Amino acid sequence: MGLRSFVALPVDKQGTVVRLSFDHAGKTKKDQLVISAAHGISARQTFLLGMPYRLSPGGNNRLGDASFLYRQIWLQQDHINGTDRFAVLGGMLLSTEDNRDPAVQIGVVSTHFRDRYELDFDVLYQAGIAHRPDAARYDLSWQYRLAPTEYPKWGIAKEWYGVLELNGRWREGSSITHQVTAGIQWVHPTWVLEGGVIKDINSEKEFRYLMSLRYHF
């Protein structure tokens, strides 16, 4: 999966993935921790949870809105050297600490995987309820296996992937912000260590830095 989006991650039936993601904004010194989890209800149905927490600066309302999503795979075609998947997303965005109104979430996600590369694309629209403004996001992620160039005949090898992404974030009342993300992933059979650098394309905001750890149960 990509660095900026959790919705494309495949999960086996009754399997669970937990991700701890740390986001640092260099200029504003804003640090955020996001706890994410995915649980496989069946081979085609997945429940996804996301919960952000602001580490700094201090103050009230550090706990952000909780994201609840259900993913249903509608199309999956497996090949000898890859797979193609298309899924729909639906759920809610709920406030945790104050009186912010909720939002309804709906979107789609697709994956194209062949040999040494993977392409993931997702779009998620958040329709605000009552006084909450609408919002939306997209993520286009390309991952390429740097090593090993060929898998060993026996056993499971540790892998290195380079990642390049185009991301977009929009909120009602403002223009869309396009971003580019570059990073690297170290893939172990049960866990993944990854990190990257994020830069806005159409604004002069600071660089942001992302590090995360995923564990697959």
Image (cartoon, grey):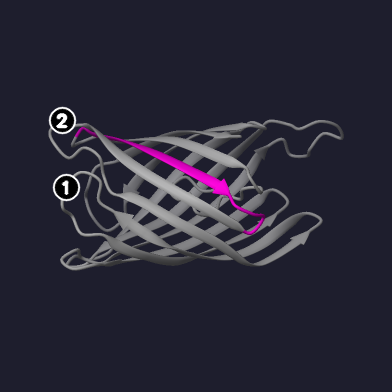
Residue stretch in magenta: 29-44
Secondary structure, mark 1, is loop
Q: Residue 178: x, y in percent?
A: 33, 59
Residue 194 placed where, x, y %? 50, 35
Q: Residue furthest left?
A: 59
Q: Is residue 127 magenta?
A: no
Residue drawn at x 41%, y 36% as measured from the top left: 21
* Amino acid type shown at disc 2: Gly
Residue type beneath disc 1: Asp
Callouts 2 and 1 close, C-beta under 8 Å: no
Query: At 64% from the left edge and 39% from the top edge, which residue is drawn?
Result: 146
- Horizontal side of residue 61 vs 92, given as left or right: left
Q: Which of 180 and 152 is in front in this view?
A: 152
Position of 79 with respect to 20 (left or right) is right
Q: In this view, does 70 lie above or below 25?
A: below
The overriding secondary structure of the stretch rendered in magenta is strand
Q: In this view, does 112 lie to the left or right of 48?
A: right
The span from disc 2 to disc 1 (Cα, nearest Å) is 16 Å
- Mark toward the start of the polypeptide (2 vs 1): 2
